[in-house]
Image (cartoon, rainbow, N blue to C red):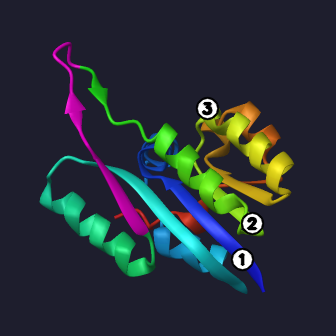
Amino acid sequence: METVSVFVDVQNIYYTTKQFYGRHFDYNALWAELTSNREVVKAIAYAIDRGDEKQRQFQNILRGIGFEVKLKPFIQRSDGSAKGDWDVGITIDVLEYANISNVVVLASGDGDFDLLIQKIRNSFDCFVEVYGVAQLTAASLIKSASKFVPIEENLLLRAS
């Protein structure tokens, strides 16, 4: 049986699906798709903690699905901008699990991950699937993946 490690950049997926489709991402549908005939080695969802109850409920849903949820505090800068970047954390975890997984899945459209994807494909000879909203995913990230899976209707919650 194929082994898979899954890494989800929650903020990126939230904002890109919201911007392009005006809808929310369906993590249950993703889980079903990724785990069919595969053994999960690790599954981590990276999010920002704003201390909000609705967000806590969402994080508990992710845990219930099977994700480990890693949180960073939301930082509001004095100039009004915000910080909550998980790029380094995601990179460290991907490097840790790539050598013990046949498949690495990254859900993000962030082009900063293209070098990471190239590195693990070359160093660990693993297959890398990248999930992202095609129109909002960096071309360099799509090119670096073994397989790019566009987020479309089947991975979105119904509009309410």
Instruction: Name the residue: 36% across, 80% down.
Output: 64
Which is more N-terminal, label 1 or label 3? 1
Identify residue for label 2.
103
Which is more N-terminal, label 2 or label 3? 2
In the rendered image, which quarter contains the C terminus?
bottom left
Identify residue for label 1.
3
**Type of residue at label 2?**
Val
Secondary structure under badge 2?
strand
Q: Which segment is the magenta one?
A: 68-80
Secondary structure under badge 1?
strand
Instruction: Name the residue: 77% across, 42% down.
Output: 119
Total residue callouts: 3
Q: Is residue 26 magenta?
A: no
In the image, residue 157 lies at what x, y percent?
Answer: 45, 66
Where is residue 77, by image quadrant? top left
Mark 3 is surrounded, within 10 Å at the Cα level, by few (under 14), some (14 to 19) or many (20 or more) other residues, namely some
**Type of residue at label 1?**
Thr
Mark 2 is surrounded, within 10 Å at the Cα level, by few (under 14), some (14 to 19) or many (20 or more) other residues, namely many
Q: Is residue 74 magenta?
A: yes
- Mark 1 touches mark 2? (CB < 8 Å): yes
Mark 1 is surrounded, within 10 Å at the Cα level, by few (under 14), some (14 to 19) or many (20 or more) other residues, namely some
For residue 112, the mark is 3
The answer to whether residue 83 is visible is yes
Q: Residue furthest top?
A: 79
Instruction: Name the residue: 40% across, 36% down.
Output: 85
In the image, residue 140 lies at what x, y percent?
Answer: 75, 32
Which is more N-terminal, label 2 or label 1? 1
